[in-house]
Amino acid sequence: MIRRDGVRLFNIQYQDGGLAHLLGRPDTRLRVKYDPRNLSSVYVELPDGDHVRVPYADLRREPITLWEHRNAVRCLKDEGRRSVDEASIFTAIREQRAILDEARGLSREARRNVVRREIAQRCADSPSEPNQSQFPAGKAEDDVDAEISQKGCTSG
């Protein structure tokens, strides 16, 4: 739903001036698309079929993946929080990233998680919309292991 404050998806607020002309129209319910490897922006499909890129409302936020988001929400819920807000999600993700950086060389799973984050970062740094050849959608564990071994990591 397009509202005055933009679009809310996954408890994250997205805002762009390009949506202003849609306010007050009866068809303000539009399809929102997203890239699970980079939630820093979503794409709103307009009634004529075009898309508008809508970034985070708070542009200071770092790009995150859907996997990181879900993991952060799960951790916050496990801590006993009833509701989860945007600030706590990004704080939890920063903490998770710090833990991953510390554990980088300690375990195989930690190295895989770091590779996932690096792939997501490459996606976020890409000036154009990523294509399937750059970032394959379903990367198998063997592919992640191969990428890890190419970077010189030992298996653990």
Image (spheres, helix red, strand yellow):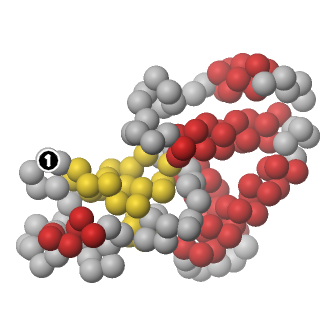
Residue 73 on image: x %, y %: 61, 65
Q: Quadrant of the N terminus?
A: bottom left
Q: Left or right: where does residue 116 sit relative to residue 129? A: right
Q: Where is mark 1, residue-wise?
A: 49
Q: Which percent across, then down, holds residue 111?
A: 79, 37
Residue 83 appears in which quarter of the rendering? bottom right
In-image side of 2 versus 70 (left or right): left
Which of these two is toward me, 94 or 129?
129
Residue 105 in the image: above or below residue 153: below
Going by the numbered disc 1, the residue's amino acid type is Gly
Numbered-mark total: 1
Residue at 26% over, 55% down: 52
Report crowding for label 1: few under 14, some 14 to 19, many 20 or more residues within 10 A (C-alpha). Answer: few
For the point 41% across and 30% down, the residue is: 131
Horizontal and vertical percent for residue 79?
73, 73
Kindly tell me whether residue 3 is visible in this rendering. yes
- Which image quarter holds the C terminus? top right
Q: Residue at point 56% right, 50% down? A: 65
Residue toward you, 66 or 126: 126
Residue 7 x, y percent position in the rendering: 33, 69
In the displayed structure, would residue 154 be above or below residue 53?
A: above
Q: Is residue 80 above or below residue 131?
A: below
Q: Nearer the viewer, residue 124 or 117?
A: 124
Q: Secondary structure at mark 1?
A: loop
Q: Is residue 70 visible?
A: no
- Residue at position x 57%, y 27% in the image: 139
Position of 67 with respect to 7 (left or right) is right
